Image: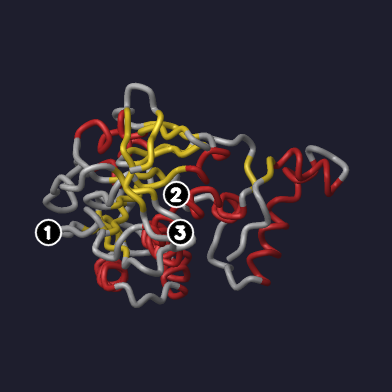
Amino acid sequence: MESIGRCLTRTFSARYLSDSKAFERLKSSFCGVWAKYNGLEEWDTDELLQTLGLEKEPHPVLLRGPLLLQQKEVISDLSCFQPYIGMPRELLGSVIPKHAPAYVLTIENLTSFFRHAREIQDDGLILFTNGFPNPDVQKLLNRLDSDLPQSTPFYHWGDTDVDGLRILNFIGTLTPNHTISSHLMSRNIWQPARLLNDQEIGKASQLRSKNVSISKLLDQLLIEGLPKDFEQENIDPALPLSTTIPTCIGMMVASSKGAPRKLIDFDPATLIHKDA
């Protein structure tokens, strides 16, 4: 699904409908038509608007990990900002890997992102998606997929329900070079709260994936029902895997166009780099 471009809803409404408030009245109908003609009938209004880039206010993208912000001759080490940093969307195109992280983990909900950022201190790269990722987060994930080696594991942590699996599946379409595995979404003991309702079954029937994590969880949801602790806020943060500290000296400057990475000497005191 392609974005129609990042735009505030009031601006979009004024520009195309000659009334800054008209889109609020029409957004349900707009999304219904868009979904029908793009084969996305299972998507609700908020999900579509989020992924299309239509929003009321632009929010900073929350992340943490071994990343650099490269602006002309100045490189800032974003890993110095703990427990996380909020990046304006205008700067995301200048964010590059410092080195290959121990893992990449996307997190659906805000509380779980905050907890992981504060409680798990390691060399992983974590990224808050706020449900379905907006176009800015989509582009960043796509670049990370291109820039990072295939040995870097990618994970997603979200709710263990049909919508959580749909988000996991959607993120997987953004990272064709890396298979997304679910994180903390399976259960050793599955305590069902209720069976899926007709709407959830309809959404599940649209979800076809070769991803093993999704297929197993989807089958369990359809057979056993929604688990009592399906919301990810019920689950304590944990490491996706044993982490190791990179041994390289210097840092990698990665290119989304596939150019070779280049080690640089980095002076954190001045935030100025010199080519090695």
CA distance separating discs 2 and 1: 25 Å
Q: Which residue is mark 1?
A: 188
| Residue type at the position of mark 1 | Asn
Q: CA distance from mark 1 to mark 3?
A: 32 Å
Mark 1 lies on a secondary structure that is loop
Name the residue located 38 percent from the left edge and 41 percent from the top edge. Answer: 275
Q: Residues within 10 Å of mark 1 (few under 14, many from 20)?
A: few
Query: Is 61 on the left-hand or right-hand side of 67?
Result: right
Residue at the location (68% across, 72% down)?
A: 37
Query: Splitting the image into 4 quarters, where does residue 276 fall?
Result: top left
Q: Which sits earlier in the primary sequence, circle 2 or circle 1?
A: 2
Which of marks 3 and 2 precedes in the sequence?
Answer: 2
Who is closer to the viewer here, 234 or 181? 181
Q: Nearer the viewer, residue 105 or 14?
A: 105
> What residue type is disc 3 on?
Asn
Secondary structure under badge 3?
Answer: helix
Residue denoted by label 2: 131
Instruction: Determine whether 220 is above or below 133 in the image.
Output: below
Instruction: Find residue 227 and report its horizontal and vertical position in percent.
Output: 25, 56
32 w.r.t. 24: above or below: below
